[in-house]
Image (cartoon, helix red, strand yellow):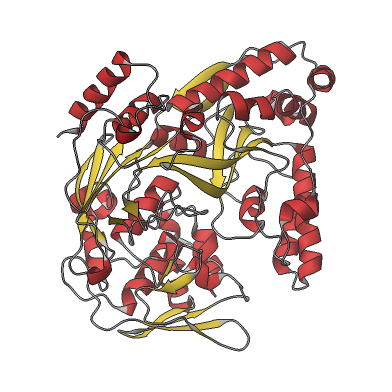
Amino acid sequence: MKLNKLLVLATVTAMLGTAVGCSTDNSKNQAGGTDTKAPAQEFRINLSAEPPALDSSIATTNPTFTILNAINEGLYRLDKDGKPQPALAKELPKISPDGLVYTITLRDGLTWADGTPLKAGDFEYAFKRTLDPATKAKYASMLAWIKGGAALTKAKPEEVEAKKAEVGVKAKDDKTLEITLEKPVAFFTDQLSMPLFFPQKSDFVKAQGDKYGADADKVIGAGPYKLEKWDHEQQLTLVKNDKYWDAANVKLNKVTVNVVKDASTSLNMFETKQVDLTELKGDQFKMYEGKPELTLKKEFVSSYVMFQVKKVPAFANAKVRQALGMAIDRKALNEVVLGGASIPSTGLVPGTVSDGNKQEFRKVAGDTQPAFDAAKAKTLLAEGLKELNMTSLPPFKLTSDDTDSSKKTIEFIQAQWKQNLGVDVTGEPLPFALRVKNMQEGNFDTLIGLWGADYNDPMTFLDMWLSDNKSFNYMGYSNPVYDELVRGADKEVDLAKRSKMLVDAEKQLMSDMPLSPLYFRTRPYAKNVNVDGLILPAMSKEWELKWVNIK
């Protein structure tokens, strides 16, 4: 059945009954609706956003990382406890006593999905392609931990090949990869599971040119599944990869991923048994509380409003930014829009993220974000406008995704700013890919963003806002004090001192308020009870499919 037909059926179902999922006397058919059972070992999922190009060098979003993780693989894959397990590597790395050199041996007989051999050189090619400044990889800074990596990212065109030769990643032979770091990175083995560190088939990548990763026939991997079909903005179809080294333990034959932005439609597709997994939005969460289908995904993810401090003169004033942040009732946002599933923010770094010194960062840092205070926000706005010689804020836009929940978040913040500050703002909901593009180009006034941890450490949330971080500092924020704290923590080997520097950095960021956190995300899902082995990771990916089994 085509996706558009599924959407029509789901929409009709929604029109016929507005109390979907509320009844408690229909236990034999809790999902309700027609009995359109999935074929054996087929898993059907709703995803609220289309992934941009499936190119592991330029990927920055969860939907992209999620699909890449299904169709390709790194040296290691994280298990249900978030621990790295050998994947394309046959064992965990051998690490030199100084923590700088990683020697990794690949499994025997590895192939790409087309049956051609996969070699250690495919990792070397991928890492160097990501670091090549011509690739314009946003995440190149993470590979810059590799010796010579930072120098390559800054190389002039005529220097690139020479700098590539100096990068500390070498295929010693077809099965042995050696990686040399600039400094010890305690979580580097974990990082090698990220799509950023996946291998790439050089001749295939070069043949596709700038279309690499854009369509199903322009993608190749070595993971549990293959991308068989991609109907953009509608559906992705994955099938089992029989050439995968661990194919015997992959149970699913087919995975169908529907791109469905409307929350009601998405839920009705679950209720009518057209999908096996969908995220619950807003008050849908309360519908499923206490039911066996409810599954919670506890994430290292923060949501926040960014202020374009460089291009919007009014937002260059800290008091204006502080006022807008303090005028948002984060507890009410969580209850009214998010259904109470998430946690109102108290700083930028979420929940149980480690401080890098065996403690939870939030417990060490405490509440660094100013509390909601409409009266104080109004006073700060008046002071800020006076300093700017303005009587009111000029017209501006609040940008976010065009999903149902994102639109509701825009409307909530619009109402808060109007009610508490007398400020009118125009909402700008955009398709996910366009919103990301505009964000990355700094083409916004204010924008609701999300950031998920790439590793379990506060640095993954804090180094983004360094003055010279052109990859992620979309607001143009700059503060030498903040820079010194973050850079100092990056070099500090005393873990207690490092933790304090990171805490002080967050306090400085929350004082300057170039962004105003909203919530730490916990995402509720409705999952059919016959789905076993699904992992909902805390970091980077929406879901992990390798071990899924339909009982």
Residue 388 horizontal side relative to residue 110, left or right:
right
Q: Nearer the viewer, residue 388 or 251?
A: 251
Q: Which residue is pictured at 63% across the width and 15% down the height?
A: 415
Quadrant of the snapshot with the C terminus? bottom left
Horizontally, is 529 left or right of 306 in the view? left
Q: How many numbered discs sit on the rendered protein?
A: 0
Which residue corresponds to the image point at 24% horizontal and 61% vertical from the top-left? 251
Q: Is residue 55 visible?
A: no
Q: Residue at x 38, y 16 (%)?
A: 18
- State the image coordinates of residue 221 (x, y, percent, origin top left): 26, 62
x and y percentages locating residue 291 in the rendered image: 45, 38
- Is residue 131 in sight in this rendering? yes
What percent of the width, then of the height, locates residue 409? 55, 25
Q: For residue 85, what is the image quadrant? A: bottom left
Q: Quadrant of the N terminus?
A: top left
> How far across and down, in percent of the image, does residue 523 sit?
51, 41
> Of residues 489 and 259, which is closer to you in this image?
259
Left or right: where 532 falls relative to 522: left
From the viewer's perspective, is residue 107 above or below residue 55?
A: below
Side of 482 relative to 228 (left or right): right
